[in-house]
């Protein structure tokens, strides 16, 4: 099995003279050279701004030491420096040179996630949904999965309630105060929207409770259901717009 692993490693190998903790240098290899800026999200020929990596002792059980390399986005409109953090398995010594000093990319910082694409009609009726769902996305991008799950659940509630208030303005006070599932059952009439919103709420509740009910579904499914919910809302709003704009009486 070892030769197979080494062949896979050899596909992506970059080298750098890394500074060790005692001030010396050592040539090591790493698997990831960025080609997209994590801040402006533009594909570019990323510059390795400092040609030295830095080796530090690592106390975690699964890793022996790690490597950090500083890169820079070459675009004049960005120019951001960022760090890519690499780690080597604790048992890396079992590999023969040059693989015994081989580092795998683990994380990048700073890393600013791209804004999610929300339909304009949905954004117009629920600006808070847009804010919160992007906060959830940012938390997830930084591996704060428990925080992200709760934030996605909150975003869903703002989306549904703002949508229902948009259609039932005289009942805004009631809609604001009732539980989300009750709001969906009472004020959402479209079948596809209602079923997607219900399931999104089920998974969203799982993200806030001690014990999960839907153990075969996770945050990825919640995100899909939120997208479906927002898209069904957008379809309904767009349909209403064309019905209003195009009066059947004008048809010959």
Image (tube, rainbow, N blue to C red):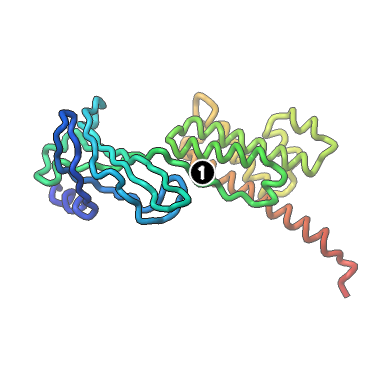
Label 1 neighbour load within 10 Å: few <14, some 14-19, many 20+? some
Where residue 158 appears, x then y in whole percent? 67, 36
Residue 171 lies, in percent from the top left, at 82, 35
* The furthest residue to the front: 76
Q: Nearer the viewer, residue 18 or 159?
A: 18
Residue 154 position in % (x across, y down): 61, 33
Name the secondary structure under disc 1: helix
Horizontal side of residue 123 vs 77, given as left or right: right
- Residue at screen point 51% across, 43% down: 221
Whether 159 is drawn above or below 235: the answer is above
Q: Position of residue 58 (x, y in %)?
A: 24, 28
The picture quadrant where one finds residue 90 is top left
Q: Is residue 201 left or right of residue 183?
A: left
Q: Identify the residue at horizontal 50%, vertical 38% (top origin).
A: 138
In this view of the protein, which residue sits in the foreground, 41 or 218?
Answer: 41
Q: Is residue 102 above or below residue 145?
A: below
The residue at the far right in this view is: 249
Q: Residue furthest bottom?
A: 252
| Front in this rendered view, residue 181 or 8 | 8
Q: Quadrant of the C terminus?
A: bottom right
Identify the residue shown where x is 31% and y is 46%. 49
Q: Is residue 140 left or right of residue 228?
A: left
> How many marks do you count on the picture?
1
According to the picture, the residue beneath numbered tag 1 turns out to be 221
Residue displayed at 10% across by 45% down: 97
């Amino acid at each position: 099995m070892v030769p197979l692993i080494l062949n896979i490693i050899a596909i992506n190998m970059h080298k750098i003279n890394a500074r060790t903790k005692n001030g010396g240098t050592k040539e090591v290899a790493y698997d990831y050279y960025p080609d997209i800026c994590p801040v402006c999200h533009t594909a570019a020929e990323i510059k390795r701004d400092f040609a030295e990596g830095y080796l530090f002792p690592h106390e975690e059980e699964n890793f022996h030491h790690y490597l950090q390399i500083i890169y820079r986005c070459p675009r004049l409109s960005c120019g951001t420096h960022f760090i890519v953090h690499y780690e080597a398995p604790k048992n890396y010594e079992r590999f023969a040179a040059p693989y015994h000093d081989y580092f795998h990319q683990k994380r990048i910082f700073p890393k600013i996630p791209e804004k999610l694409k929300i339909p304009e009609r949905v954004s117009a009726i629920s600006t808070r949904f847009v804010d919160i769902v992007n906060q959830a996305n940012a938390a997830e991008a930084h591996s704060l999965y428990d925080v992200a799950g709760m934030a996605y659940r909150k975003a869903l509630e703002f989306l549904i309630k703002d949508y229902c208030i948009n259609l039932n303005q005289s009942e805004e006070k009631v809609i604001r105060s009732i539980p989300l599932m009750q709001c969906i059952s009472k004020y959402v009439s479209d079948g596809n929207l209602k079923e997607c919103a219900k399931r999104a709420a089920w998974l969203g509740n799982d993200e806030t409770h001690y014990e999960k009910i839907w153990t075969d579904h996770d945050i990825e499914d919640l995100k899909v259901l939120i997208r479906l919910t927002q898209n069904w809302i957008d379809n309904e709003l767009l349909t209403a717009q064309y019905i209003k704009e195009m009066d059947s009486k004008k048809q010959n």
